[in-house]
Image (tube, grey):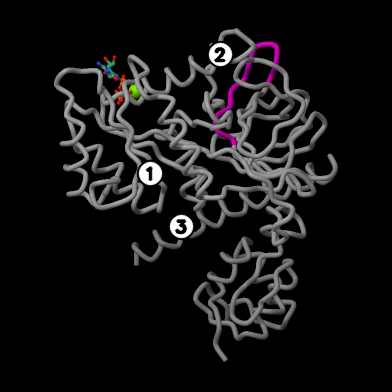
């Protein structure tokens, strides 16, 4: 039975057409009988796939990447192994409605309350301990950032909760609506921060009323979304905002494995630092990252030399939802890269070799594909 074209199979196996036709020749296929559009039967395709380390299960070609690459461990099924983790929160809203002011207030108040008293580094994520409940919240302050786009492409969503900021003297505006659409599409959990409530012309009730026109129903406005009337400038009700986030996180029952699983995380940002080399801010999502942990990300790897928090203070271990600066990368990983722990340096090196080779072949395939397209156009 006909199954797949040579070109499609080559594409799915991540090999060049030439490699595939060589392999087909050994199976007795005549070179000039073959072409990109030649349709192979199931059995032939399976034989060839196997040669390249793939298997065909039912009708789908299963990549045998696990043989050479490293993937996240399957989801944890033993609920007893899961522990509560802090919520990861981003802030969205219209221009000038006060996103940065709110983040700065949270960041500063966390420094004042913190025991370090140092100057914070501007890293793409930071932790706050709430004043009343003493729970942690992780804020990401770069939602427009390349890292997020890349993560979204992969279908990974690191954000648990969105704080939607609306200025009480300006109400719902185009980017508010955009943010609402984003929240609805990604099924994000929303807390409303009705900002600038210190201003005499603030009309928070009007904001909540206007929001109902866009499917956002706050408590007392036909729904159960929490709304807090704040001022990022004066600090009015900012503690309440943090407590609402913590309360929502509890409802969401956010949990992760802290131990017994290879570390996973995402690169939020990266840079070369004078005297320190390649540094990446990593948001850990699973497991515990420590000095000596060996991690791969994109096409690079590293043995963790040191971990630092946003206070530039060395930390021994980074657990789920903790952002940390990771030192010790061979090359600079990219924002959005998935970080995975591997057991040995040898494994890290072979994973990176494989990824580099795979992307080289994929690049060649793409070029080949373009050449073929041009040929067809010229005909
Ligand atoms: P973009 O990053 O440009 O989208 O703006 P933003 O949402 O980060 O707003 P930003 O925090 O920069 O605030 C815009 C202006 O509003 C600044 O002049 C702030 O000082 C002012 N502002 C922010 N929050 C408050 C508030 O609660 N009360 C008052 N009175 N002014 C505020
Ligand atoms: Mg801003």
Give the labeled residue for mark 3: 371
Of callouts 1 and 3, the N-terminal one: 1
Q: Nearer the viewer, mark 1 or mark 2?
A: 1
Of callouts 3 and 2, the N-terminal one: 2
Residue 190: mark in rendering: 1
Q: Residues within 10 Å of mark 1 (few under 14, many from 20)?
A: many
Looking at the figure, which quarter contains the N terminus? bottom right
Q: Is residue 298 in view? A: no
Name above or below for residue 113 compared with residue 358.
Answer: above
Q: Nearer the viewer, mark 3 or mark 2?
A: 2
Q: Position of residue 152 (x, y in %)?
A: 46, 47
Of callouts 1 and 2, the N-terminal one: 2
The residue segment tinted magenta is 267-277
Q: Is residue 216 in view? A: yes
Give the labeled residue for mark 2: 120
Looking at the figure, which quarter contains the C terminus? bottom left
Q: Residues within 10 Å of mark 2 (few under 14, many from 20)?
A: some
Give the CA distance from mark 1 to mark 2.
Answer: 27 Å
Q: Residue at left 66%, top 58%?
A: 75
Quadrant location of ligand 1? top left
């Amino acid at each position: 039975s006909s199954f797949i074209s040579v070109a499609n199979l080559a594409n799915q196996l991540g090999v060049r057409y030439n490699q595939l036709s060589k392999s087909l020749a050994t199976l007795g296929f005549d070179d000039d009988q073959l072409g990109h559009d030649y349709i192979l039967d199931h059995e032939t395709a399976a034989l060839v796939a196997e040669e390249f380390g793939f298997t065909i299960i039912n009708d789908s070609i299963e990549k045998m990447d696990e043989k050479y690459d490293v993937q996240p461990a399957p989801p944890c099924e033993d609920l007893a192994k899961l522990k509560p983790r802090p919520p990861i929160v981003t802030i969205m809203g219209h221009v000038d409605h006060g996103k940065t002011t709110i983040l700065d207030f949270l960041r500063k108040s966390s420094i004042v309350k913190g025991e370090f008293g140092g100057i914070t580094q501007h890293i793409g994520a930071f932790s706050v301990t709430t004043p009343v409940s003493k729970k942690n919240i992780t804020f990401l302050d770069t939602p427009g950032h390349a890292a997020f786009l890349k993560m979204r492409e992969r279908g990974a969503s690191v954000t648990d909760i969105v704080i939607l900021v609306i200025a009480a003297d300006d109400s719902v505006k185009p980017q508010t609506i955009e943010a609402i659409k984003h929240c609805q599409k990604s099924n994000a959990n929303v807390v409303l921060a009705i900002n600038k409530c210190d201003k005499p012309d603030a009309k928070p009730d009007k904001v909540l009323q206007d929001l109902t026109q866009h499917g956002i129903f706050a408590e007392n406005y036909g729904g159960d979304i929490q709304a807090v009337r704040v001022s990022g400038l004066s600090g009015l009700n900012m503690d309440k905002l943090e407590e609402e986030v913590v309360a929502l996180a509890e409802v969401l029952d956010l949990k992760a494995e802290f131990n017994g699983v290879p570390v996973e995380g995402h690169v939020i940002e990266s840079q070369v630092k004078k005297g320190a080399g390649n540094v990446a801010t990593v948001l850990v999502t699973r497991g515990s990252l420590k000095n000596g942990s060996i991690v791969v990300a994109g096409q690079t790897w590293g043995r963790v030399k040191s971990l630092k928090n946003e206070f530039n203070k060395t930390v021994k271990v980074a657990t789920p939802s903790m952002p940390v600066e990771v030192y010790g990368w061979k090359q600079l990983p990219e924002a959005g890269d998935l970080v995975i722990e591997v057991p040995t340096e040898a494994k890290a090196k072979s994973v990176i070799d494989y990824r580099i080779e795979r992307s080289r072949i994929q690049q060649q395939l793409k070029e080949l594909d373009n050449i073929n397209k041009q040929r067809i156009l010229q005909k």
